[in-house]
Image (cartoon, rainbow, N blue to C red):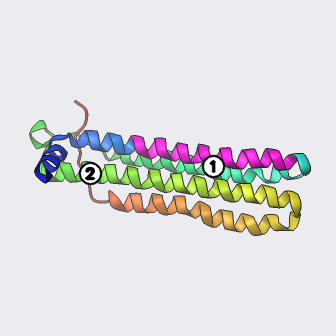
Amino acid sequence: MSSSWSRALTQISPYTFASIGIAISIGVSVLGAAWGIYITGSSLIGAAIKAPRITSKNLISVIFCEAVAIYGVIVAIILQTKLESVPSSKIYDPESLRAGYAIFASGIIVGFANLMCGLCVGIIGSSCALSDAQNSTLFVKILVIEIFGSALGLFGVIVACAAHLDHNQIISCC
């Protein structure tokens, strides 16, 4: 069975792997941002009924969630610039396959790191809104925790950039 998997992985175009990685980078990052905004926004609206003063200052949690989607778009643009044309005789060379897998892995890394970051920031933002409605002195304390949760997305971007660092060659769609 392992020979069929290895044969399948080497027969799929590296451009396909790279394109799927780029799509995962954007798609899953936006999904994480949307999920975080949903969690934060619903709690923010509910808590604002009790304390309308929290609405404007707790929008920072929504902005942190939107930053998660922007991380995915930035990495997708960086990965897209790594795509280059190679002659059709070199499509399945080891260097082309390695480059395609590296871009694919980078997209998966940043996509799922941003999915978890969006959930983390959304849950912390929800807690921030609910606790701020009860006690306004807790806002800054929880905001610091939210900033640390937001750093998870940046770690994913750094690891994704390191994963494709020396893999510049991949085929173009021609």
Q: Position of residue 85 (x, y in %)?
A: 22, 39
- Is residue 70 shown in magenta? no
- Drawn side of residue 142 relative to residue 6, left or right: right
| Image x and y of residue 91, in percent | 15, 42
Where does label 1 land, which residue? Answer: 36
Residue 38 part of the magenta-drawn span: yes
Q: Give the dominant element type of the magenta stretch: helix, strand or loop.
A: helix
Residue 45 rendering spot, x and y as whole percentages: 80, 44
Closest to the observer, 84 or 10: 10
Element marked by disc 1: helix
Residue 127: image quadrant is bottom right
Residue at which label 2 appears:
101
For the residue pair 81 and 106, the one nearer the viewer reads as 106
> Where residue 39 sits in the image (x, y, percent)?
68, 48
| Residue lying at 12% horizontally and 48% vertically, measured from the top left | 93
Q: Residue at x 25, y 32 (%)?
A: 173
Judged left or right of residue 4, residue 73 is right
Q: Which amino acid type is shown beneath numbered disc 2?
A: Tyr
Instruction: Judge from the rendering whether residue 41 lies leftward or rightward of residue 28; answer left or right.
Output: right
Label 1: how many Cα within 10 Å (few below 14, some 14–19, many 20+): many
Q: In front: mark 1 or mark 2?
A: 1
Position of 9 with respect to 119 (left or right) is left
Q: Is residue 168 visible?
A: no
Q: Residues within 10 Å of mark 2 (few under 14, many from 20)?
A: many
Tell me which residue sits at (34%, 41%) in the image. 20
